[in-house]
Amino acid sequence: MLKVLIVDDEPFILQGIKVLIDWNKEGYEEPYTAGNGVEALEILKDTPVDLIISDVKMPEMNGIELLKAIRSAIKIDAYFVILSGYAEFSYAQEALRYDCTDYILKPVDKDELIGILRNVAHMKASTNLENEEQKKREKAYFDRNMIALLNGKFDYANLTFLEENICLDGQMCYVGISLDVQAITDEFTDEEKKTYLRKLYEAAQEYLKEDSILCVMDVSGSEKIYDIGFIYCDRLGQKLKMTDKEYLSNFFEYLAKNTNLPITMLVGKYVNEIRNLCKSYGTSSMLRSLQGFREKKQIYYYEEEYKISDTGVVLCKKKIDELISAIELNEHNLIRQKVDEFYNDMQNSGIMGETMNLNINYLLFQLIHLASEQDNDVNQEEILRLISESTFEEGIRRGSRSHLCRMTCEYGDYLAQLRKNVSRGVLGSVEEEIRKNYATNLTLKGLSEKYYVNSAYLGQLFRKKYGCSFKDYLNKQRIDEAAKLLLRTDMKIYEIAEAVGYKDVDYFVNKFIIAKGCTPAKYRKQ
């Protein structure tokens, strides 16, 4: 409902205008009233309004002086309508020079006033819509710069823009907040999961309020991860007189309670400068990859998961090296045997807790090193994550040797294909598949199975050739097709979204803004 203030020094006119109109029917609250400009300014200090209807000639402060005051001194952005008699028409002309919306001649005609009220309501709705679209464009541009920073692909312009638009004091870190897809049953489609992600994002913005700009949606770009990113800094906790852990714990509890969704929070390493947030993001991504070898938690802290005591550390290096050799040979039976021997060796040595984590970390980083030796451009975190995720899909119990068996066998397949360099022909076939079937539920895993390529390797090929993930490549194809439909057809926005493969219209609009710099409606209009 819109708010209106009527200003006139004659009480019977104030009362007459109040009863003349059915304000609620026209979308307005019951009007506020003031007897002159000074009284009006007192009301406006504490009560923002959308429309002011003011007489011209009043004691203490007349209507023109009131209009000048709200436009120049106190900067109130409200529509302003002058009440004027025929002899005062010159006042109305002067008012128009100070951004006066309209004027009404006395005595007030009901139909004329209703017409003005409806025109103001229409202009307000149009302004609100344009402001919302502008906010979306600005947020999409901010997100683009932030994601470039987090991925370490930023330049001076990205960094300068972010430093000018956000205030990050003291230490800071990247916090990944993702849907626990293992806890969400398979009966939910990808589009439904995106709807859940949107719900999570909106709840995070509600919690953060004026700091909501620090929350970015769908940071990872992975088709299997539904996440939002959050930049935490000391200022946020200090403002509420909380420690970092208290703040993040409260944030987590708020999100879980208000969305009723299973979520996980991954807190990356603390850094001192905004340019180093990519390092914090990298450690958060590593935590995601290592979840399968950790006790199930709601919040994982990088500093804790990688903290190893100085005493009593035992590394089962011999068994790990034997397992790595089996992975290099890609002999699955031998891999399973060596995994069993590795676990048995840890159990016989009494290894558990942090020391077990050390052994697992050592193994995983040795595996990454193997891939790096084959290809210097390999995205280490992404490959480890993709392979770890593929084993989760089999429903393996978290932290078990069975999980490690699955992952290491998968990694052996990946290394074998990396050595063979089977990219010739495969990418062409996959590209053709995307061109023909972009509107269907294409996934990296589905395409890898169809063309007999390891999904992690196929994802790496996309990253290497196009500089983006498979998901981003597919989104680009869909958005480009949507742009053609916007220009060549009169289909509605939601129809176009569905035609190119998006069930969630809000998600489609957000992706379109990121890609084209404006909303679909504005793109068509231009």
Image: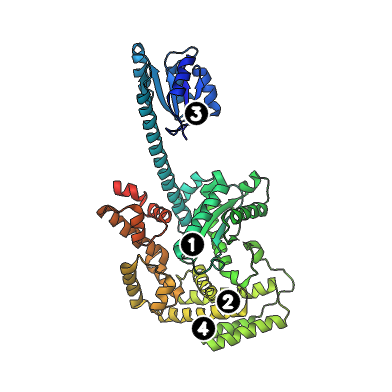
Mark 3 = which residue? 30
- Where is residue 265? Give x, y as percent: 59, 60
Give the Cα separation between the discs numbered 4 and 1: 37 Å
Q: Nearer the viewer, mark 3 or mark 4?
A: 3
Query: Alpha-carbon neighbours of circle 2 within 10 Å: few (<14), some, or many (≥20)?
Result: some
- Where is residue 473? Give x, y as percent: 38, 64
- Mark 2 or mark 1: name the one nearer the start of the chain: 1
- Mark 3 or mark 1: name the one nearer the start of the chain: 3
Give the Cα separation between the discs numbered 2 and 4: 23 Å
The disc placed on residue 207 is: none
Q: Is residue 526 visible?
A: no
Mark 1 = which residue? 193
- Where is residue 326? Give x, y as percent: 55, 85
88 up-or-down from 414: above or below? above
Say what secondary structure mark 4 lies in.
helix
- Mark 3 or mark 2: name the one nearer the start of the chain: 3
Tag 2: amino acid: Ile
